[in-house]
Amino acid sequence: MCDSLISITSAYRKDCTGSGGEFSDRAADWLRAALAIEAETLPGKSRDAAAADAVARLAARAVGDSELRRYARLEWNRDVRTPFEALYLFAAHVEHAGALELADAIVALVPSAFVLPVQDVGRFTALRGRISRKRGLNDFARDQYLATWRMGVTTRSDELRARAALGLGTLAQRSGNYPEMVRFARRAARFAARAQLRFVEHEAHRGQMTEAAKRGDFGGAIVEAWRALECAGGDPALEAVDRQSLGQLLLEVGDHAGARKLLIDVLRRGPRPQVTLAALGSLAVTAANTRDDRLLEWVFGQVDRLRGARLPLYELASTLLECAQAASIRGWIPAAASYRDDSLRIALDNQFHEFAIKAESLALVAPPPAAVATVTLGTPARKVIRRVAALKPSPLPRRLSIGAATSR
């Protein structure tokens, strides 16, 4: 591969150009490890176990020991066992940081650099499918997932079948085919549970949660959100996402006490900006509906403070719109207009059509007292609500801290 060094450096250059700067303070270590992988594809290289071990040590250093252990426990509920697992987690780490071009180059190079067992070939193939889907290459992603599925069937690997089913379900969701998404998500959850793939099982339950909520089956969505939370296994980043989702669902069914408890807990964890913004928006609405003006003013203060930070615009537009709705519920019309106008401006500037339509149609008048919606929930959902009610409430944080912009 005579132009191999160009492919890695140019891939990362594309990532940096698209993002406006470096992705991580570990970027130099990323490149050192990636270039070492690339060098193993050159003619005359041994491709043996000793070479794989040496490159894997560089990859582990690029991720960091604690983060590598965290990723391994999320993936397999255990520590790393082979150099190829370390290389897989290295590529996934780069992907989750948002450097998709570099991650794709790494995933494409590893099978050329080393002789991999079929299980590892399948893992890298599925990961390339996920990266390709994030890059908008859905047809190529589907080919990768189908190849992974075939490998899983041939080798009777629950892990490969779980990864393939999850990927195919995600593609079905993106295309709006929710029945097919649910079918694949259930299959992914079943295979992942057998293979003890915590992260895959977690994502499969989140997919089913999304589909149930779309259908208005909030009871089913609550149950799936709780199952996802159980799969998070104490991982701070995943737990924050799941608690925010569950809090939003409890808000939908009118359990404001449970929603408030979960959302405040999320904010105390200092999650990534997307989760922080979503939690603030939901908390504003629950505060308005329960006439908790002190809490609502606290939320507005935090949102106003964060406006000057570098934040994901889609989530910011959503949160500002929820703040506008909350202010309107309380009859605070000037505040409602201000938040509505800011949300609309961001939506129009970035072609977020959904938020633009909602912002333009928001009535800036205090609504009459809303009738309490009655949602009939089954026994499993009521059991989840009782479990949330038993949780100890957390006090409001004095000042929000926000985690990294991208996280697993």
Image (cartoon, helix red, strand yellow):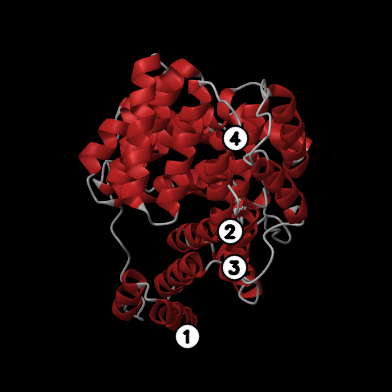
Q: Do the residues labelled 2 and 4 touch (CB within 8 Å)?
A: no
Q: Mark 4 or mark 1, which is nearer the start of the sequence?
A: 4
46 horizontally vs 124: left or right: right
Horizontal and vertical percent for residue 41? 62, 40
Image marks 3 and 2: residues in contact by CB distance under 8 Å: no
Real-space Cα separation, disc 3 to disc 2, in angstroms: 13 Å
Q: Position of residue 306 (x, y in %)?
A: 64, 71
The residue drawn where x is 35% and y is 47% is: 140
Residue 334: numbered disc: 1
Q: Nearer the viewer, mark 2 or mark 4?
A: 2
Circle 4 or circle 3, nearest the eye:
4
Disc 1 residue crowd, few under 14, some 14–19, many 20+, Cα 10 Å: some
Q: In the rendered image, is residue 400 in sight?
A: yes
The residue under label 3 is 19
Q: Viewer-nearest of labels 3 and 1?
A: 3
User: Is residue 376 visible to the viewer in this orientation of the structure?
Assistant: no
| Marks 2 and 1 in Cβ contact (< 8 Å) | no
Earlier residue among tags 3 and 2: 2
**Secondary-structure class at tag 2:** helix
Q: Which comes before the other along the chain, label 2 or label 1?
A: 2
**Image quadrant occupied by the C terminus:** top right
Q: Do the residues labelled 3 and 1 touch (CB within 8 Å)?
A: no
Q: Kindly identify the residue that appears in the image at 67 percent across and 60 percent down.
A: 23
Give amino acid for label 2: Ala
Task: Classify 69 as above or below 143.
Answer: above
Q: What element carries label 1?
A: helix
Q: Residue furthest front?
A: 44
Callout 4: helix, strand or loop? helix
Q: Is mark 3 on a helix, strand or loop?
A: helix
User: Which residue was labeled with disc 4?
Assistant: 88
